Image (cartoon, rainbow, N blue to C red):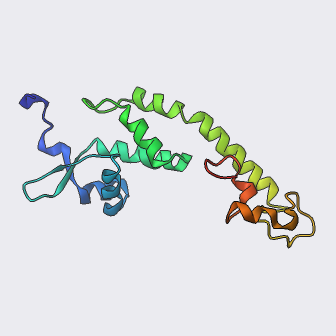
């Protein structure tokens, strides 16, 4: 790799600078790095330094988490980005389009939750006289803790 391809010193930020600019705690940045979501280089003093473009990756991780993507899914998405250049607006747009159906599902789930809150929260407590999700003889207790009927559609739940 020639010297012309090495980013100049001004493109590298310390973990403190990245944490300050991204609003993400340094401990979370180290976790993201451990999970392969972001990468750093080490100085001679073993201090982490991140390329300025890492700020975009962190913003992407935060947005993806808000959508409800698991870290493994976020990593898979980030792994599809080019390594030899900073991702472009088109790269990010392509990835975000894959979230649309996920967002629609999440919106439907939240609307269902909102609409069901008036009559039952799906906990199986049997304390309500009128319950759309009646849990006769506490049969849902065999499925584990939590609001079993409200977890429909969540991977690993129901």
From the viewer's side, name the closer residue of 105 and 16.
Answer: 105
Q: Which residue does the image show at 86% across and 67% down from the upper left?
A: 137
Q: Which residue does the image show at 15% across and 45% down from the upper left?
A: 10
The single residue placed furthest to the right in the displayed view is 129
Image quadrant of residue 121? bottom right
From the viewer's side, name the closer residue of 127 and 40.
Answer: 127
Residue 5, above or below 134: above
From the viewer's side, name the closer residue of 152 and 17.
Answer: 152
From the viewer's side, name the closer residue of 117 and 90.
Answer: 117
Q: Does 17 sit left or right of 32 as displayed? A: left
Residue 138, above or below 38: below
Image quadrant of residue 128? bottom right
Where does the image place residue 84, in percent across and percent down from the top left? 24, 29
Where does the image place residue 60, in percent across and percent down from the top left? 42, 43
Q: Which residue does the image show at 61% across and 47% down from the upper left?
A: 155
Where does the image place residue 15, in percent across and percent down from the top left? 24, 57
The single residue placed furthest to the front in the displayed view is 142
Q: Does 98 sit left or right of 12 as displayed? A: right
In the picture, the quarter occupied by the N terminus is top left
């Amino acid at each position: 790799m020639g010297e012309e391809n090495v980013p100049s010193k001004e493109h590298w930020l310390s973990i403190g600078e990245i944490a300050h600019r991204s609003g993400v705690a340094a401990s979370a940045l180290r976790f993201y790095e451990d999970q392969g979501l972001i990468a750093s280089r080490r100085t001679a003093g073993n201090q982490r330094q991140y390329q300025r473009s890492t700020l975009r990756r962190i913003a992407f991780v935060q947005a993806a988490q808000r959508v409800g993507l698991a870290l493994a899914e976020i990593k898979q998405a980030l792994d599809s980005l080019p390594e030899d250049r900073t991702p472009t607006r088109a790269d990010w747009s392509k990835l975000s389009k894959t979230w649309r159906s996920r967002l629609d599902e999440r919106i439907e789930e939240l609307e269902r939750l909102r609409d069901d809150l008036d009559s039952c929260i799906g906990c199986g407590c049997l304390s309500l006289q009128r319950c759309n999700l009646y849990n006769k003889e506490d049969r849902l207790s065999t499925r584990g803790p939590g609001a079993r009927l409200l977890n429909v559609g969540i991977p690993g739940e129901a």
